[in-house]
Image (tube, coloured by chain):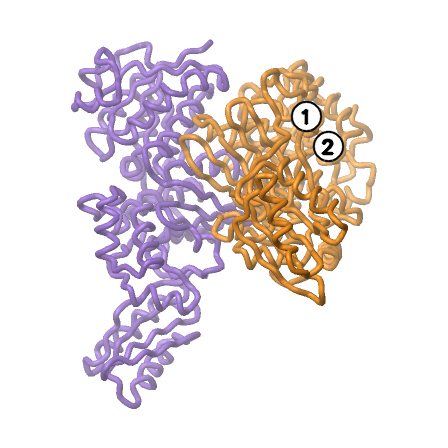
Chain colours: A orange, B purple
Amino acid sequence: MKTVNVAIMGIGTVGGGTYRILTEHRDFLMKTQGIDFRVKKVLDKNLERIRSFGIPEAAAASSPDEIAADKDISLVVETMGGVEPAKTFIEKMLLAGKDVVTANKELISKHWASLEATAKKGGAGLYFEASCVGGVPIIRALQESLQANLINSIVGIINGTTNYILTKMTEEGMSYEAALAEAQQLGYAEFDPTADVEGFDASYKLSILSSLAFHTCVPYTCVYREGITKVTKTDIRMAGEMGYVIKLLAIGKRARDRIEVRVHPTFVPKSHPLAGVGGSFNAVFVNGDFVDDLMFYGRGAGANPTGSAIVSDIVYASKRVSPLYSDFDNNGKAEDGVEIATDFVGKYYISITVNDAPGVLAALSNVFAKNNVSIENLIQKGEKGRAAIFFLTHACNESDVRRAVAEIESQSGESRVENIIRVLE
Amino acid sequence: MKTVNVAIMGIGTVGGGTYRILTEHRDFLMKTQGIDFRVKKVLDKNLERIRSFGIPEAAAASSPDEIAADKDISLVVETMGGVEPAKTFIEKMLLAGKDVVTANKELISKHWASLEATAKKGGAGLYFEASCVGGVPIIRALQESLQANLINSIVGIINGTTNYILTKMTEEGMSYEAALAEAQQLGYAEFDPTADVEGFDASYKLSILSSLAFHTCVPYTCVYREGITKVTKTDIRMAGEMGYVIKLLAIGKRARDRIEVRVHPTFVPKSHPLAGVGGSFNAVFVNGDFVDDLMFYGRGAGANPTGSAIVSDIVYASKRVSPLYSDFDNNGKAEDGVEIATDFVGKYYISITVNDAPGVLAALSNVFAKNNVSIENLIQKGEKGRAAIFFLTHACNESDVRRAVAEIESQSGESRVENIIRVLE
């Protein structure tokens, strides 16, 4: 039976989950995959963590060089996270001809092209199913199951932390602050939640998924990004009244050579399959020209689901005769001739507070009309002299909405635009 | 650039869809996959159909032997359907060393082991992603993405016809007969709908999916099968009142060496992700020991989605260095030591009509209690002297339910058990 010796760099949550799967399922994988996977070396500066997973001390590597020099090890898992030193360590392994399996979305989205070049130089493969949406096998699906299709769009709930917070706000009427605090207590959100709540994490993943879906490099710097920190209880309630739920969506669309990539809170119609994706679950909705609509749903994070994706990559890599490269050949920049859109067309929810006086609504309506923003639905709620008016527009240019809103805010100072949220169509 | 010459046997709906994708996306596939796929030969006794897809007559093969003898053709698509002559034709191609891609669930579920043996003899591969759930890439997911997991269960809505009918009954209050007639008119149901409405189609697919999920042969003859023809408007309405929708589910479960495989109408809790899968959409819900819950949702049939799965297999097969075999090595029978369950434990919906007289409910309740069937919920509706009583049981043995029901029916002849439907937990 073939033996594959593996090293793991970084024994945190996900690295630990990977170690557990490989050891607990060693016999199972021998039986079902015909390969004996052995964890030969583990690298982590925290020896306590290594011990806590019951890993024999003899397996603790003193440096990445020790792993790179070990001829028995053919595959290295990177679960350290962050750009450095993960990047340097991975490059060492690739140049030593070892396949690398990583869960590192930030690193892949920022340095994919250069890492792939290094992998080619070393004759090694670079696998990153675990970098996007945890246990949901969306990367393999794009690479091995949807080849027949020109992908039109990919729309996902791909950050568990924000989905947990928004679900709590929706189902229990919590404020953003209270829901965040609960998520932090449960370990779903970091002490510094910026990467999640401001949409950075989702933008890294969207960059990777869009690049694969559209067969061209979509740099993460091109992703329009807006977090959930400004979403209020009022917005959540009004969404509900209007037939929507608010989700942080990552949206990638391609029409010919124009690509639109954006991460922002979004009104999702209650009838849409993504609307029901609650709590820490994630889902990716894909539309291809022949396959039509598809959705992949599952756990987007956690030791075991992400470990499942890593071990899947380990098995997949170990059975390949030669690595699979994305071959964008563009050095991490958008291809010539590919336009990354910065203007969007869509429907918008606009929440405005005004002094409740005769003629106010007429004035607002005039400003919208003058700027080509036509209103589909409107709800007005009065509160002690002030009124809140909630508009849902028909599809229009975002630039028109921005112009209308600026004009409203510049007038007399009494009307205030509280929030603008895009609507999924 | 590598060229792969393909032949298609059977130019019906799915074969035609496959031809269209390969020709319309020839440049796209060259660019994204680096392979030039050419349809060199097409076999169909109906020349009119060949012409209708704009296929040049020179490409029409006169016999399968002509294709088998063509050294340029390395891959053959079978989209004829049915067991014979598809089986004989496929065997010819495999023995000639040609990879075969098929959408034929009946053939694979009935003759998988012998076809795989033939494939090995010919040094060819056998691919059948399109045989289960159309465009939903569930087979590739089981083989290439979920290897890390011991799969605990696989629960699917895997027949579009019955899901269309049940959705119409649920959303529009149609009778089974009216919904079937509409499905036939729209081409979603055959003139003879038996294969779909009696659950044969779903049982073939469940046999294939369970075999892959549980890494052991699950013969289709072992699948417990019950169709949707006895589901009434009343059952649908009562399900709604009790918080459920009725779906035809295909359920495969494994606990140690005991496998449970069954296809039957099922009460699905409205909060379950499968409950929202409507119309002709399909979905497969999988639970693995590390990845936890996953759902794959999409179009389960049709020329384009199924064609997408076939072309995905064509690309996948063309990039493999050696074929992937399932290697159950058991000649199409359940493995020694694997028990295919025939007794189920679960919750049941039981609909009974009775003469509305004092003591009737007490008598029924006594029979249930005596047979260890405990009641969770009960709704009684009176109608002109007769009453209908709808029971929802706690989890119990199906044999106990059957015994209770037989006893009720044997008593005095006044009580009639109208329907028994299993409940998903």
Q: Which residue is mark 2?
A: A41
Instruction: Find residue B375 and report its horizontal and vertical position in percent.
Output: 41, 76
Q: Quadrant of residue A2?
A: top right
Q: Which residue is mark 1?
A: A73
For the residue carrying disc 2, how many other residues have a C-alpha within 10 Å: few (<14), some (14-19), or many (20+)? many
Instruction: Find residue A391 and report its horizontal and vertical position in percent.
Output: 59, 51
**A284 sits to left or right of B133:** right
- Measured Cα–Cα span from mark 1 to mark 2: 8 Å
Secondary structure type for disc 1: strand
For this rendering, which residue is in front, B387 or B407? B387
Confirm whether residue A109 shows in the render: no
Secondary structure type for disc 2: strand
N-terminal of the pair, mark 1 or mark 2, is: 2
**B421 sits to left or right of B82:** right
- Tell me which chain the residue with mark 2 is part of: A
Instruction: Find residue A24 and report its horizontal and vertical position in percent.
Output: 61, 44
- Tell me which chain the residue with mark 1 is part of: A
For this rendering, which residue is in front, A241 or B1? A241
Whether pointer 1 and pointer 2 mark residues with C-beta atoms closer than 8 Å, the reply is: yes
Eyeballing the image, is A49 above or below A69? below
For the residue carrying disc 1, how many other residues have a C-alpha within 10 Å: few (<14), some (14-19), or many (20+)? many
Q: Quadrant of residue B187?
A: top left
Quarter of the figure with the N terminus of chain A: top right
Residue for point 64% across, 34% down: A38
The kind of residue on which mark 2 rests is Lys
For this rendering, which residue is in front, B23 or B284? B23
The kind of residue on which mark 1 rests is Ile
Instruction: Find residue A67 and report its horizontal and vertical position in percent.
Output: 75, 26
Residue for point 34% across, 74% down: B390
Confirm whether residue A14 shows in the render: yes
Eyeballing the image, is A19 above or below A148? below
**B248 sits to left or right of A319:** left
